[in-house]
Structures are given as structure tokens and as C-alpha cells.
Image (tube, rainbow, N blue to C red):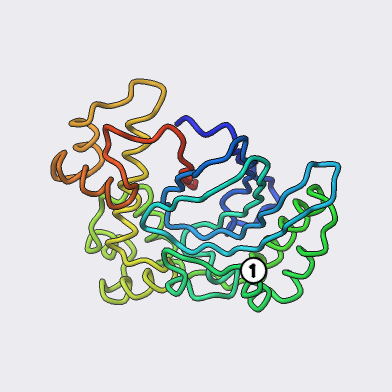
Amino acid sequence: MPWPSDYHEHAESTATPHAIEAEWTFTASSDGVHVVLPDGRMDLIVAFRGEDDCPVEDLRLLIVGPAQRWTGVPVARGDRFFGIRFRPGRGGACLGVESAALRDGGIFDNDVDDVLGAHAQSLRVAATPAALAVTIRGVARQRAASASELPSPVQRAIELVHVGGGRLGLEEVAVAVDMPERTLRRHLSHSLGLSFKAYSSVLRFQRTMRLLTRDDHPLSLVDAALEGGYSDQAHMTREFRRHGGFTPGARPPLVLIGMAFD
């Protein structure tokens, strides 16, 4: 789908731990408010100002939790962000936080120091944007490499929900991974920070956004509602308002939306 030109994702290397989904950068080319759409993931972010050949200024640290609703982020021209997005269910373990405690919110500035300890300090002393990029990548990879793995059935369940675009029911997923529904529901809520229902709804929204905005033959609203797994177009409109703050037919031109993981 089309991306704001200020936002860029960077290809993973073979050395990237599986828990990390993407590395991204954002540089605001104008003053304004950017709409960030929910994707159910967690991000480690450094926000700062400074050109590539200049010292880092106004550094801020952020850990953003799994979201189920849109967020308006005010930016000024020249504001820069480096981010690491973790795969669904992996951010909490990698960053040492309870995912559900950060739902639709996050941890900021000095509170991030309390969570990350020496890793936060290493980010704060990075002298240049290039050094900061290397440091945040290293911090994320170290924490991902040392984090405990999800139980295999839970990881498989998250993958199935994703592949199904949020259209599978909990009973179907539980049968597929051979785990009682109640147990699976508890594991998913703990790892994702969102309930199964909320996470599935976010995935339906994300997938339908891509169906409506893809370059090759974007779907009509009626067809998108059907393919997206909504009961009807009115249902799709309600969910778009809840997750994105807009209707399917009146989408803002510049939004940041998480990419699907492999």
C-alpha cells in the first residue's frame, strides 16, 4: 500500500532475531499531526533532532505498547524517529514489560531508563544519528536474543490468526494448535497484551486497509467488507471508526500502518 514518504522500513538481515519484525525511520518533512494506526505490536523508539553530520539533540526514549485504536502524533519539521517493531506477542518479553499494562499507551523518557537500565544509557550517550541507529539496533537484538520463547502452540496460534487476517474464531485456532480454548485465550492475552477478540479485530482492520489501498485493483467498499471478514459494510464502517477514527470511504492521505509479518 502507499506509504508516507517520511516513513521508511529497512530490510532485515539474516542476523536479525526472529522476535524483531522491522526496523524503521521517520523524519517529519513538515509540521502537523500524523495518524498512527494500530497494529497490535510493540515498538522501542528513540525520538530526536539533528542532521546526520550533527550531534543528537532533544533525545526522548519511548516504549509503545500494543494498540487497538489510532493515535495522533504531533510533529515538527525535522523531528526524527528510529524504531524497532517487535513481532506480535514478543515485545513484552524482549523489553521486560507487561504487554497489557502498555495497551493503547506506553512508557516514556525516564521511565524507560528504569525498564532498560544500561541499555537506555547507551542510547542516551550516542553522539550522532548514525551511532544512535547502530545502538538501538544492538539493544533490540541483545534483548531479543536473551528473551524467553513463546510456547510453540501459542506462537503457532498467533501465526494462524495473522494468516487468517483476523477472520478465524478462537475455537478453530484452539483446535488447530491442540490447546483448550480457555488456556489459549489466557496465553494470547498475556503475550499480545490484547484479547483474542481485540487482536483479531485489529488484524481485520489492517488487512482491509491494504485491500482498499493496494495499487493493483483496489476493492470496492462492499467487496472489501466481505473479503475483510465483516458481516456487512456498516460493520466495517464501525470498526474503521473505532480503530482508525475515519470511515473506509474517507481515509486520511497520510497514515502510518504496520506491515504484515512473515
Give the answer, above or below, for where 221 lies relative to 260.
above
* Image spot of residue 46 (x, y percent): 67, 57
* Image spot of residue 145 (x, y percent): 67, 66
Q: Could you tell me which residue is drawn at 46 percent across and 35 percent down?
A: 254
Observer-nearest residue: 175 or 6? 6
Observer-nearest residue: 144 or 115? 115
Q: Quadrant of residue 201?
A: bottom left
Quadrant in which the N terminus appears: top left
Disc 1 designates what residue?
109
Q: Quadrant of residue 11?
A: top right
Q: Secondary structure at mark 1?
A: loop
Q: Could you tell me which residue is drawn at 63 percent across and 71 percent down?
A: 112
User: Residue flagged by tag 1: what amino acid is it?
Assistant: Asp
Give the answer, above or below, for where 189 lies relative to 5.
below
Q: Could you tell me which residue is drawn at 37 percent across and 69 percent down?
A: 188
Residue 107 placement, left or right of 215: right
* Residue extending farthest top: 217
Q: Quadrant of residue 197?
A: bottom left
Observer-nearest residue: 255 or 181? 255
Residue 30 placement, left or right of 184: right
State whether residue 259 appears in this view.
Answer: no
* Image spot of residue 253 (x, y percent): 42, 32
How many discs appear?
Answer: 1
* Image spot of residue 68 (x, y percent): 36, 58
State whether residue 136 appears in this view.
Answer: yes
Residue 61 placement, left or right of 203: right
